[in-house]
Amino acid sequence: MDGTLLDSESLSTKSTELAFQEVLGRKLTGDENSRLIGRPVEKVLKNWFPDDGTEIYRVGAKHFETMVDEVAPFPGVKDMLQLTAEHYRMALVTSSQRKYAEKMLRLTGMRGYFEFIVAQEDTVYQKPDPEPVLMAIRRLGLSSNQCVFVGDQPYDITAGREAGLITVGAVWGSGDMETLSYYHPDKIIHDPHLLIEFLESVSGKKQ
């Protein structure tokens, strides 16, 4: 969701920067930010800062919630989802908490495209562990070789591959071509409108 469908990572970073400054009295480093993207932020912060992690997350989440109405889809994403939904079933796997995922998808008019959401609190482990991806496959009632996993971060590619899926690196949003290439997804796509063509090429027919 974040960085693939929605341009929400910049707000997440800004919120975390504010929280670091308020609670720790220092700036968020580039390395820290890169290791937070695509991860369950609250859990990671608690692991990094046993004494202050909860407060850092609270301050950042409060700022995020005040600005969440400004989060928008990346150009072309809604059209892509509409076209894809005409031929394929879709579910969403996110490391975000369910309340944020549901709210942002509904605000942007995209919730209806997905049969369900596997959110942070649904599994013990999150991406890059394959557990949430495997849960989605089970809930869809499909096998791994019937599914494609699309994401913008290395954690997505790793989780999808470990679950046995075809993986697509999305670089129309927050994804970086050079970074994702290192993890060797089955396909890298620069434009969301090209996703349906790839799905048809691997499925052999519209489903």
Image (cartoon, rainbow, N blue to C red):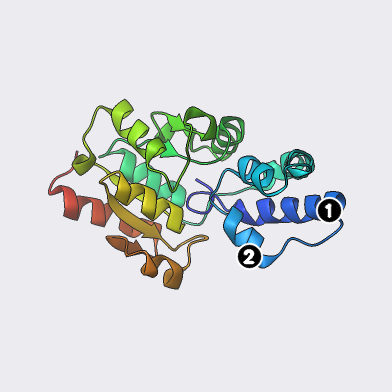
Q: Can I make out residue 152 in this image?
A: no
Quarter of image, res 133? top left
Q: Secondary structure at mark 1?
A: helix
Count of numbered tags: 2
Residue 94 is situated, as x and y percent measured from the top left of the image, at 49, 41
- In-image side of 144 versus 156 (left or right): left
Q: Who's the residue at 26% across and 47% down the image?
A: 165
Three-letter code for the amino acid on which mark 1 is drawn: Leu
Q: Who's the residue at 42% across and 29% down the image?
A: 116
Q: Who's the residue at 48% across and 52% down the image?
A: 4
- In-image side of 6 versus 56 (left or right): left
- In-image side of 202 versus 139 (left or right): left
How many other residues sit within 10 Å of disc 2, few (<14), some (14-19) or many (≥20)? few
Q: Which residue is mark 1?
A: 24
Three-letter code for the amino acid on which mark 2 is drawn: Asp
Residue 86 vertical placement versus 189 (above, below): above
State the CA–CA distance, disc 1 to disc 2: 16 Å
Quarter of image, res 105? top right
Q: Quadrant of the C terminus?
A: top left
Q: Are marks 1 and 2 in contact (CB under 8 Å)?
A: no
Q: Which residue is mark 2?
A: 31
Pick whichever of labels 1 and 2 is earlier in the sequence. Answer: 1
